[in-house]
Structure formats: structure tokens, C-alpha cells
Image: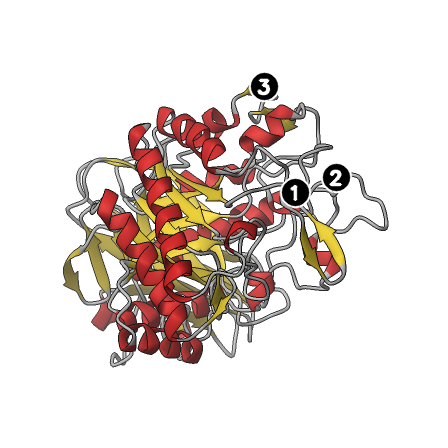
């Protein structure tokens, strides 16, 4: 959940959290920077409104046909005293002797942060930040400065002056967290986690210290039941990822101050758009009998959680159920099944929000799905999506636009049920026949972006992702997959296999597995 905008000036939004944000630092209808409150000094003709932007189709630009030196600045007023950081989205040709964002006359030391050269994809905007800006007296001047030769250029957009992050304190009311289902299984086979300094701790304590406050917990009907896929038999580890295990995990999450997001799969095995295998105990059931079974299972889950004082704030009825659930393909019976799930949740806890978890962020598909939900009378509270850069090949901006669209079309807030980003493309053991999902499927790890599969790239990408979703104003929460995955024998994605997703977790391959710097994204966005 996000704080509402309280006032609007030309190109400037002031949020209830006291941050200042230029959502598009110039207006498309403007002809000069001065109209937007910007002042330029030096070779003023080198400053202009560019017809390209990160937020919309305009940004602040510096360029000239001859050597030039120019700065453009703006004075912010009525700012509460405290520590802040300045962020801007930038592009640059590179080669200038000066290309930077700056602050001055804020009451503390001036700041200067260089704008790097834009490499490769010219649609990519780089986040540049100046940290630890002390504001006292209410005013602060922010700006961009450049000194370059003919033809060298830079663009700057989306200036934001934000409160300096504090470890363990999330910057907004939007929930940010991820899936912690593997915690108990991993501990049972000897897995260990440590903080950045190498101190072994409960993984939930490490997450809590980094403002991770949303705990997604998956529940399968009867893990351990063999499931045949493509002529091969698979099974989940018996005694884990079921209702009893979920209660233990939920209690631990609540002890660490987390909001609960339960995920019902209505299967004995992994579900996704390509597979929605009916639970073994429900085989042969159809119509009203299947609806009753799904209702009773959902009701049992909710009453058990409530009896243990861990009633979830959110619950998804199904996982990536684009075209099927519990063995039923999308159609009237499919929506009737989901309605029974909704009714079972509300019968126990009217306050719990029911999430529909879909994937494939395609506007036409979602519109059709939402239209059918209305047609068949399905009730739900939030529309959810899986949105990974490597599965969608979408930029962060495209994902934000999609989220805005489906929120408006459905008249619902949005839950990002899954997102992930790799800090490496190697698996822990590096064997040629053991590949991560990204490598095995020949996917581009960051889609059309250019952050790189490194801890630094993971940090930068997730900060921008969190901020972009926050800025939509319609995202209630973001659940990362899988933040705690480590490859320990016995804790693979199925019995006898490896993790396959340890490359997208926030822990390295040491023993114990040490937290990466990128975990700070949860409080520093």
C-alpha cells in the first residue's frame, strides 16, 4: 500500500512521506526549462528540453555544437530537516570532463555524483544517486552540471529527493518481501545462512534486518505424492510445504514482524501455466464434488491458520492459474472453483485479501481474463502477476505501464506475486549438467535492460524495480522468488534434484551462505 499524493505543482509531486519527486522533470507542453522552475547558467543555450524521457517523452538535456560548460538547477523549499539522498535517471554520451548531478546550499556539505556513459541499449536509463545529504533550514538546491566538447550530451529525468534509508526500516507502506517456504526444509538438511559479516543467524532475522516484511508461504495438498510429467516421475519432499509446515513458517514470520501471504497451489506438486495437476485425493471429482473439495481444503487451511494466530493478510487461490486450476481448464467451471476458494477464505476471515495469481503480463490476456471473471461472477480483492525480466523480456518501465493498465481495467490493486533477478549465471557447484533455469532456457537475465548478473546489478535492478512499482500507486506488495534459495543436498526443487534458482537468491555460495549487498534493496529503494 502506498501513500497518496497530496499536492501537485509544475513537474513536482510532494508525497505524504515528505519525499520530493519530479516525475518527469519537465512538462511536455513547456517550451523552456524556466517554465518548470529550472535555472541554467554558463552556456545556457546548451541546456534544453529533450524530446525523450524516462518518465514520459521529455527530459532535461545538455548538448552543444561547440565546446560548452553549463549547469541547470532548481531550488527546493520547505523541506523537513534531516538526511536525504538525491536520485536521477540519466543517459550520457560519455567523454565530458564534467557530467554530474549535484546538491548545494542545503545546510550541509555539497554533493557531486558523476553520470556514467550509457553503454549498449540507448533505451536504458541509469540511476545516479548522491547520498547522505544533510538538509537544515528548509531549502536545498539540486541540479545537473556538464562540461564537454561538441556533440557530447547528457539527459536527466525523474529527480527525487528521498529520506536517507535506515537499515531495517522500509521507506514506504508498500509490502516488500518474498517466498520463505524453503526455510524449514533447508534447515532440516543442514543448510545455514549468515549476515553480510558472516555471522550465522536465522535467515528470517537477516531478512528482517533489511526491511523484508512480506512472507510468502506456499501450500501443497499432499507433498511427497508422485506426479508424472513428460514420462518421468517427480515428487516434493514429504512433510514440508504442506499445511503443518506452513503453520510453523507463518509463526516464525510473525515473530519477525512480517505480513503473511499464503499461496495455495491446489495440487500435490508445482503449478504454473503449463501444469495444474489435480491433487491425487481429488482425482475423478467433477462439478459440485470438486467445488466442495476445494472449498473444504481452503476452509481447513484458513481455520488452522486462524487457530494458531497466524491468519494471513493475503492469500492466493491458485498459483499462476492463467488457463487452469486443479485440473480444470479455464471456463465457467474454472471460475466457479475459484469462487468457492474465495468464499472459503471469507467465511473464516473477511479481512484477508484474496489474490488472483496470473503470469504472462500481456494486456490482451489479462483483459480477457478479467472480462470472464466478471461474466461468471468471480469475486477477488487483488489481481496478481509474476513479472521477471528474463521470462517477460520487458523493461521496468513497460512492467510499470502494464501494472497501471491492469489496475485500472480490473479496478483492483496489484500484488506482484513473483519477481527475481540473478546475481550470477553460475550454479553453486558449476557442473556442466547443472544449470540454472535462466541458462538452461537461454534467457536474457535482465531482459532489455543492462544491469548485469552480478550482486551490484541485482541491487541496482531491484531498487529500480521496487521504486517503479511503488510509483505506480497501485501495488500493495511485491514478493520475490526465491530470496533464500541455497543449494543444499536434500533441499532441491524436487527430491533428488538441485535448487536451480540459487542464482537469484540474496545469499552467496559460501558456508554458511552469506547475505549479499543486494539484500539492501528492500530498504534502500
Q: Residue 192 appears in which quarter of the rendering?
A: top right
Local packing at callout 3 (Cα closer than 10 Å; few below 14, some 14-19, many 20+) is some
Q: Which mark is residue 200?
A: 3
Horizontal and vertical percent position of residue 239? 57, 32
Q: Are marks 1 and 2 in contact (CB under 8 Å)?
A: yes
Q: Nearer the viewer, residue 486 or 268?
A: 268
Horizontal and vertical percent position of residue 236? 63, 43
Residue 48 seen in render: no
* Left or right: where 46 falls relative to 412: right
Residue under the image location 17 percent in, 42 percent down? 138
Local packing at callout 2 (Cα closer than 10 Å; few below 14, some 14-19, many 20+) is many
Q: CA distance from mark 2 to mark 3?
A: 19 Å
Q: Earlier in the sequence, mark 1 or mark 2?
A: 2
Vertical position of residue 125 compared to residue 186: above or below: below
Q: Secondary structure at mark 3?
A: strand
Local packing at callout 1 (Cα closer than 10 Å; few below 14, some 14-19, many 20+) is many
Q: Secondary structure at mark 1?
A: helix
Horizontal and vertical percent position of residue 70? 41, 64
Horizontal and vertical percent position of residue 53? 41, 72
* Left or right: where 398 falls relative to 456: left
Q: CA distance from mark 1 to mark 2?
A: 7 Å
Q: Secondary structure at mark 2?
A: loop
Q: Nearer the viewer, residue 508 or 43?
A: 508
Q: Earlier in the sequence, mark 1 or mark 3?
A: 3
Vertical position of residue 183 compared to residue 299: above or below: above
Q: Which residue is mark 2?
A: 428
Residue under the image location 33 percent in, 41 percent down? 302
Q: CA distance from mark 1 to mark 3?
A: 18 Å
Q: Nearer the viewer, residue 488 or 45?
A: 488
Q: Are marks 2 and 3 in contact (CB under 8 Å)?
A: no
Q: Which residue is mark 1?
A: 502
Amino acid at each position: 500500500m502506498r501513500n497518496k499524493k497530496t499536492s501537485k505543482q509544475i513537474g513536482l509531486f510532494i508525497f505524504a512521506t515528505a519525499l520530493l519527486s519530479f516525475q518527469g522533470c519537465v512538462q511536455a507542453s513547456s517550451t523552456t526549462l524556466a517554465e518548470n522552475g529550472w535555472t541554467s547558467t554558463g552556456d545556457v543555450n546548451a541546456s534544453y528540453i529533450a524530446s525523450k524521457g524516462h518518465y514520459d517523452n521529455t527530459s532535461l538535456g545538455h548538448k552543444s555544437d561547440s565546446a560548452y560548460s553549463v549547469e541547470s538547477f532548481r531550488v527546493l523549499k520547505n523541506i523537513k530537516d534531516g538526511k536525504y539522498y538525491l536520485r536521477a535517471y540519466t543517459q550520457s554520451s560519455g567523454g565530458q570532463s564534467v557530467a554530474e548531478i549535484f546538491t548545494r546550499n542545503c545546510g550541509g556539505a555539497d554533493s557531486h555524483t558523476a553520470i556514467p556513459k550509457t553503454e549498449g541499449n540507448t533505451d536504458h536509463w541509469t540511476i545516479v544517486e548522491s547520498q547522505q545529504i544533510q538538509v537544515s533550514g528548509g531549502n536545498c538546491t539540486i541540479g545537473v552540471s556538464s562540461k564537454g566538447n561538441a556533440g557530447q550530451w547528457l539527459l536527466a529525468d525523474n529527480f527525487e529527493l528521498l529520506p536517507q534509508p535506515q537499515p531495517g526500516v522500509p521507506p514506504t507502506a508498500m509490502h516488500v518481501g518474498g517466498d520463505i517456504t524453503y526455510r524449514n526444509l533447508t534447515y532440516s538438511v543442514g543448510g545455514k545462512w549468515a549476515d553480510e559479516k558472516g555471522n550465522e543467524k536465522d535467515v528470517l532475522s537477516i531478512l528482517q534486518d533489511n526491511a523484508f516484511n512480506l512472507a510468502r508461504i506456499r501450500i501443497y495438498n499432499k507433498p511427497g505424492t508422485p506426479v508424472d510429467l513428460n514420462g518421468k516421475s517427480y515428487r516434493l519432499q514429504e512433510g514440508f510445504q504442506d499445511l503443518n509446515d506452513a503453520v510453523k513458517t507463518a509463526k516464525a514470520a510473525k515473530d519477525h514482524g512480517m505480513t503473511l501471504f499464503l499461496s495455495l497451489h491446489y495440487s500435490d506438486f508445482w503449478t504454473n501455466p503449463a501444469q495444474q495437476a489435480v491433487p491425487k485425493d481429488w482425482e475423478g471429482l467433477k462439478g459440485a464434488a470438486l467445488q466442495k473439495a476445494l472449498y473444504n481444503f481452503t476452509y481447513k487451511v484458513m481455520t488452522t491458520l486462524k487457530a494458531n494466530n497466524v491468519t494471513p493478510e493475503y492469500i492466493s487461490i491458485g498459483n499462476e492459474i492463467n488457463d487452469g486450476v486443479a485440473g480444470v481448464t479455464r471456463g465457467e467451471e474454472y471460475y466457479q472453483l475459484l469462487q468457492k476458494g474465495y468464499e472459503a477464505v471469507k467465511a473464516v476471515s473477511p479481512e484477508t485479501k484474496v489474490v488472483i495469481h496470473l503470469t504472462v503480463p500481456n494486456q490482451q490476456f489479462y483483459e480477457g481474463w478479467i472480462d470472464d471473471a466478471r461474466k461468471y461472477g468471480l469475486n477477488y480483492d487483488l489481481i496478481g502477476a509474476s513479472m521477471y525480466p528474463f521470462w517477460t523480456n520487458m523493461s521496468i518501465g513497460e512492467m510499470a505501464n502494464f501494472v497501471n493498465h491492469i489496475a485500472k481495467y480490473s479496478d483492483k490493486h496489484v500484488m506482484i506475486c513473483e519477481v527475481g533477478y540473478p546475481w550470477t549465471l553460475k550454479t553453486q557447484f558449476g557442473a556442466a549438467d547443472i544449470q540454472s533455469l535462466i541458462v538452461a532456457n537461454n534467457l536474457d537475465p535482465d531482459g532489455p535492460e543492462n544491469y548485469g548478473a552480478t550482486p551490484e546489478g541485482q541491487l541496482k535492478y531491484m531498487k529500480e524495480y521496487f521504486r517503479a512499482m511503488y510509483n505506480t500507486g497501485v501495488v500493495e506488495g511485491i514478493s520475490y522468488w526465491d530470496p533464500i534459495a541455497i543449494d543444499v543436498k536434500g533441499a532441491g526443487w524436487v527430491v533428488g534434484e538441485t535448487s536451480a534458482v540459487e542464482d537469484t537468491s540474496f545469499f552467496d555460495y559460501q558456508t554458511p551462505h552469506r547475505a549479499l549487498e543486494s539484500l539492501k534493496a528492500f530498504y534502500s529503494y
